[in-house]
Image (cartoon, helix red, strand yellow):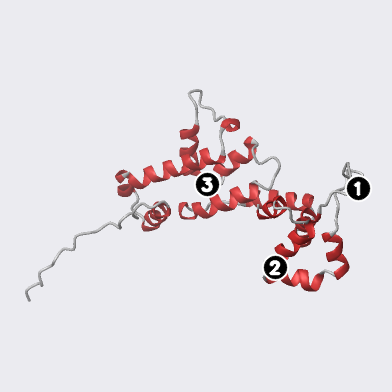
Amino acid sequence: MVTNNYLNEGKSHPEVIDLIVLGFTGKLLQWWTNCLTEGSKDDIRKAIQKDEEGLPIFQEPPGRGIPDGVNTLIYTIINHFLGKPNNITSRIYDQLSNLRCRTLGDYKWYEDMFTTRVMNRSDCNSPFWKEKFINGLPTLFGEKVKETLCNLLGEIDYDSLTYGDISSAIRSVGMKMCRDFKIQSQASKSNVKYELGTFCTQYGLPPIAPSKRKSIDRKPESP
């Protein structure tokens, strides 16, 4: 993180905070300029670390408080724009529970949204969320992915799987379908072909060509 680089270079917390603020734009800049008082800004710059009881933590020596301005700034921003951490966790749970990949054409978006949000939870590696990631896919496609991940006993060891492993399996199944000409012949409906085709193009494969029917030239009937 760039803030750690600044601190490792020997810059003080107030100096690092001023450098961070120089990069503020839009809502962040308006918040810093208009919402915070000069006293609040000064409190952030001079903040020191505290223990669980709220008491200052002092260095040994020289007995001064350990600077904590950068972390205080980050926490203040999160608290202002997103709310307290416990509220954030509850909100993320609701968002993840309702997140669905309606069509295969939406998978790239779904993968980005799910993994970004689940990583904000302390239990992000639990089997519950990994299974939820798969269950959010279109039903039949999700079943194919589960079949791929099953061991010889027909079970999925979610504890040993990473989200990268699951994503890799999803892409593998999807790309196999893209290459499978039998799927093309069975997908007589144009919307099914379009959905599968948009999944292919997300990973660099050519889209499925629409079926071509040979036109039959009809001779004009003689009067």
- Give whichever of discs 3 and 2 has the lower sequence position: 2
Q: Which mark is drawn over residue 137?
A: 3
Q: Which residue is mark 1?
A: 56
- Label 3 secondary element: loop
Coordinates of residue 68 in the picture (x, y in percent): 81, 52
Residue 207 to residue 173: above or below: below
Residue flagged by tag 1: what amino acid is it? Pro
Question: Foreground: 113 or 128?
Answer: 113
Residue most extreme to the top: 153
- Give whichever of discs 3 and 1 has the lower sequence position: 1
Residue flagged by tag 3: what amino acid is it? Leu
* Other-residue count near label 2 (Cα within 10 Å), few / some / many at <14 / 14–19 / ≥20: few
Q: Is residue 71 left or right of residue 38?
A: left
Residue most extreme to the left: 222
Q: Are marks 1 and 2 in contact (CB under 8 Å)?
A: no
Name which residue lies at 78% across and 56% down.
Answer: 13
- Label 2 secondary element: helix
Name which residue lies at 56% across and 52% down.
Answer: 112
* Mark-to-mark CA distance, 1 and 2: 29 Å
Name which residue lies at 77% across and 51% down.
Answer: 85
Residue 176 to residue 191: above or below: above
Residue most extreme to the bottom: 223
- Foreground label between 3 and 1: 1
* Mark-to-mark CA distance, 3 and 2: 42 Å
Q: Which residue is mark 2?
A: 22
Residue flagged by tag 2: what amino acid is it? Leu
Question: Foreground: 78 or 215?
Answer: 78
Residue 152 to residue 26: above or below: above
Q: Is residue 42 left or right of residue 202?
A: right
Coordinates of residue 43 in the picture (x, y in percent): 87, 61
